[in-house]
Image: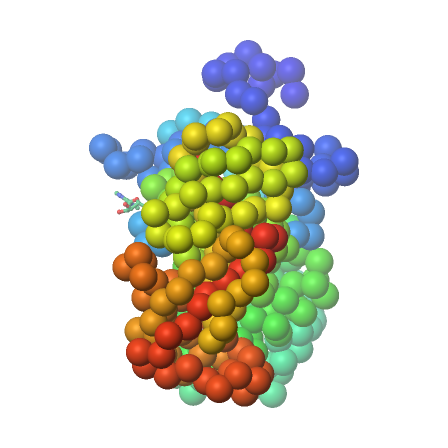
Amino acid sequence: MSRDSSHGPTVTPAKPLSLHSQESDFVQIIDAVKKFGATTAVQNVSLSVKRGEIFALLGSSGCGKSTLLRMLAGFETLTSGRILIDGEDLAQMPPYRRPVNMMFQSYALFPHMTAHANVAFGLKQEGRPKAEIQERVASALELVQMSHLAKRKPHQLSGGQQQRVALARSLVKRPKLLLLDEPMSALDKQIRQRTQIELMDILDKVGVTCIMVTHDQEEAMVMADRVAVMTDGRIVQIGTPLEVYEYPNSRFCAEFIGSTNFFAGTIVEDEADHIFVQSPDLPKPLYVSHGVMGQLGMEVTISVRPERVAVTRQAPAQNYNWAHGKVDNIAYRGGYTLYHVMLDSGKMVVANVSSLALTEMQAPTYDDEVFISWSPESGVVLTK
Ligand SMILES: Nc1ncnc2c1ncn2[C@@H]1O[C@H](COP(=O)(O)OP(=O)(O)OP(=O)(O)O)[C@@H](O)[C@H]1O
Ligand SMILES: [Mg+2]
């Protein structure tokens, strides 16, 4: 490692993720930057991925996800920064020694070749013995449950089947790191959900480390052990799906992952175990049952998820976290109903009401007067 200290700027390695991270940080991206002319596609990204982890890069179109993935695959050089895979600098590794395989969004199967030939292609190029190719292709096709369709060409396969062939083609090379760019984008919603579960099972069986790109937050939540939320080439939050959903670190993350209600206001009581916030949106103060790094008079935003908001016909007994309003819109979603309630202040609040709750009260309809309320644990305090 000493040879590395002689060149390049001094960089702080990504923060260890766990006690075990020293030995298990399989991928380390250190202060990676990628510029295309005047565009900075990736800005000072540092992150580590553990061995065997499924890690999702999540962000809206153009935020730099594919660029970061392409740098990991070695298809793009870094403008600055470093990428280490299993402790080795990617830049020092010749392409054929990189333990990485990337599956592209379009799958890019060869149209004139059968599924079997598509999977065998990479191994043939490596000049592997025939018997070994046969054996490895057979077991890769079996893994993705495509053995029975091995003789078909891509146009004779469904989107989901093509996706599995593409996955077999990536896995047959036994990469240590599998990169998936929007692996489900060609699939419709129902088959996509089933394929997500299948893909997780397969990755688990193979034990491969996987970094996947998606702009579908549900997909990231379902599949990934951890998620990185990106915007404008930067990472804004990294955490487990539960962490980024329940404890977003900014308004951007709170809105990007799921939907939420924001109440802007001022801290009017600041204690170690709770705060009160006064907001022009609400007649009652907001009460949050935990302390924050802040002080009296500070401007904050409280995020309250729609599924945390109760809709009732009677005024709540508590002296905080509620408001009166009128039902402005009702969106039936099957398992639940979204109520848009216009508060007396003019603020619109969305509440996700379960079918059970609706049957227990007389379901409010358009223009009905209602109250919304939530518990002190439901508010997340955001300062940026
Ligand atoms: N080869 C290139 N030359 C110039 N600009 C590029 C190049 N590749 C990507 N960019 C720009 O870099 C930025 C990030 O692109 P990237 O493809 O990484 O986005 P993305 O997050 O994958 O988006 P999407 O979800 O739409 O696939 C965009 O502004 C894009 O226009
Ligand atoms: Mg992309």
At 42% from the left and 60% from the top, the residue drawn is 323
Please, which residue is most extreme toward the top here? 6
Quarter the N terminus occupies: top right
The total of numbered circles placed on residues is 0
At 43% from the left and 30% from the top, the residue drawn is 297
Q: How did the renderer colour the structure?
A: rainbow
Quarter the C terminus occupies: top left
Q: Where is residue 59 in the image (x, y as percent from the top left)?
A: 41, 52
State left or right for residue 116 relative to residue 384: right
Q: Where is residue 320 in the image (x, y as percent from the top left)?
A: 52, 53
Front in this rendered view, residue 158 or 46: 46
Please, which residue is most extreme toward the left here? 38
Q: Quadrant of residue 278?
A: top left
Front in this rendered view, residue 35 or 370: 370
State left or right for residue 2 relative to residue 180: right
State left or right for residue 165 relative to residue 139: left
Residue 73 seen in this snapshot: no
Q: In this picture, is 111 found above or below 99? A: below
Q: Where is residue 232 in the image (x, y as percent from the top left)?
A: 34, 42
Q: Quadrant of residue 207?
A: bottom right
Q: Position of residue 368 (x, y in %)?
A: 36, 79
State left or right for residue 15 relative to residue 355: right
At 40% from the left and 42% from the top, the residue drawn is 265
Q: In this picture, is 97 found above or below 172? A: above
Residue 198 seen in this snapshot: yes
At 39% from the left and 53% from the top, the residue drawn is 282
